[in-house]
Image: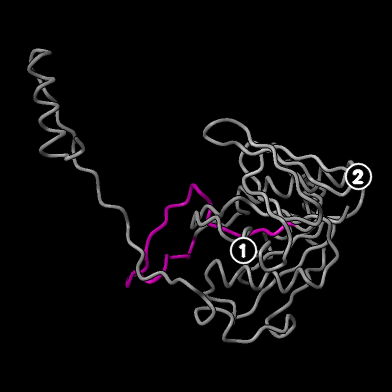
Amino acid sequence: MDIIVCIKQVPDTAAEIVPNADGTAIQTEGIPWVMNPYDEYALEEALRAKERLGGGVTVICLGPQNAVGTLRTAVAMGADNVLHLVDPAFEGSDAHAAARVLAAAVKGLKYDLIWCGKMAVDDACGYVGTALAELLGVPHIAAVVKVETAEGKVTAHRETESGTAVLRCPLPAVLTAEKGLNEPRYPKAIDIMKAKRKEIQAKGAGDLGLAPDSLGAAGSLTRVTKFERPPERGGGTVIEAPVAEAVQRLVAGLREQAKVL
């Protein structure tokens, strides 16, 4: 089975994110970058399918030059081939424009299944996998926690508010990985060293035949107007009174001050 995994490089979730001086972006200096955690689940599931069924795993990353490190992590985990989509024309692309770039790259490849993470932890958008399936004209199942493939079909389980939904569709298809799908492996030291020698293929907008006005801010449907830190939390209020009086004061505070009742 030939599987494609789309990954994204994101700031480490433990990093402190601070807006730049004019609030148009975040300060990226000194931030550690990692593979998006949901994409790790996607890659791990693809690698397990390869180990069971044979075939190969190709990883695609749309990102800046320093995303090469994340691609090498994918190689160390077991990916057979990696493709870096890097071009100044891609900068400023929203989720829709990013899906357009990924679709153009995927159309030139052989695949039975495409995995993406459910969402990227930097923007929590959850749009790219769905849009990619639509642009490719293939079925899509989101937030998968269990998957099986047989006889040219994929059966996927996803959690809902009322239980577990079991969905089936023909291959090829796009699936997005949810937390709990698996436990991603840690690359071995020897595999990390080997990955440093792996040739990283790169493609830009011209290689994909994409028009400049379909990329970046020009090709985006949304735009971020401002980044700002959440407001500082104020101190709590301690109510010291007999229980009956304390309850009355608490309810009054929730209604009149917090305005949540």
Q: Amino acid at mark 2?
A: Leu
Q: Mark 1: which secondary structure? A: helix
Report the predominant secondary structure element of the magenta stretch: loop
Q: Secondary structure at mark 2?
A: helix
Residue at x-position 60% and y-position 53%:
36
Q: Is residue 96 left or right of residue 81?
A: left
What residue does disc 1 label? 131
Residue 229 to residue 257: above or below: below
The one nearer the camera, 209 or 34, is 209
128, 73: nearer the viewer: 128
Q: Position of residue 186 (x, y in %)?
A: 72, 42
* For marks 2 and 1 on the same chain, the one whose residue lies earlier in the sequence: 2
Question: Circle 2 is placed at which residue position?
Answer: 53
Quadrant of the rendering where the C terminus is positioned: top left
Q: Which mark is residue 151?
A: none
Query: Does residue 10 show up magenta in the picture?
Result: yes
For image coordinates 50% across by 59% down, the residue present is 31
Which residue range is magenta in the image? 5-30
* Render colour scheme: one colour
Q: Amino acid at mark 1?
A: Ala
Look at the image and say whether residue 26 sits in the magenta stretch. Answer: yes
